[in-house]
Amino acid sequence: TGVNALGNTFHVDLCRKSRHDKDVVVAEPYDEIAVKRAINARIKDPDVRVLKAVKVGMDFHARYSAVKRTYFYKIAFGYVRPMSLFHQSSAWFVDHELDVQAMHEAARYLVGVHDFSTFRAAGCQALTPVKRLDVLQVQEQE
């Protein structure tokens, strides 16, 4: 925990077939609202929802066409009482104080272009371990 999916994009390739003849492809595609409703009706987890469906070109791929990604990590620290129910599944809990200023200063060294080979999984499919980190912010919130 500590990282959560917010605003993710996915794609699905659909081919609309005639109800009467399964070998016939219907020219008009499903409309976006119908696709969104159909997917949401079948998602079992009430915390996961499709908010918008958009028709894209056949060359679009949610993973490989992405031009950037944004990650948010939450660390709850120093709490002596149980963590809020709103944060229990979305934050990493550390039971001691953290030096937020030192973390902020250290973050500066990660911004830029770096080789992240050390952090790759054995089966990583990325073409290169070299990545560009544009922004890294450490913020303390009450």
Image (cartoon, rainbow, N blue to C red):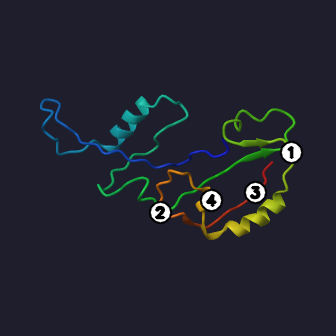
Disc 3 to disc 2, how far (Cα)? 25 Å
Q: Earlier in the sequence, mark 4 or mark 1?
A: 1
The 10 Å Cα crowd at callout 1, few under 14, some 14 to 19, many 20 or more, is: few
Residue depicted at x 31% and y 58%: 59
Disc 4 to disc 1, how far (Cα)? 28 Å
Quadrant in the picture for the N terminus? top right
In the rendered structure, the answer to whether residue 49 lies left or right of residue 1 reads left
Q: Earlier in the sequence, mark 1 or mark 2?
A: 2
**Tag 4 residue:** 118
Disc 4 to disc 2, how far (Cα)? 23 Å
Residue 103's x, y, as percent? 79, 60
Which circle, 3 or 2, is nearer the viewer? 2
In the rendered structure, the answer to whether residue 104 lies left or right of residue 112 reads right
Disc 1 to disc 3, how far (Cα)? 17 Å
Amino acid type, callout 2: Val
Secondary structure type for disc 2? loop
Q: Earlier in the sequence, mark 1 or mark 3?
A: 1
Q: Quadrant of residue 30?
A: top left
Amino acid type, callout 1: His
Secondary structure type for disc 3? loop
Which circle, 1 or 2, is nearer the viewer? 1
**Tag 2 residue:** 67
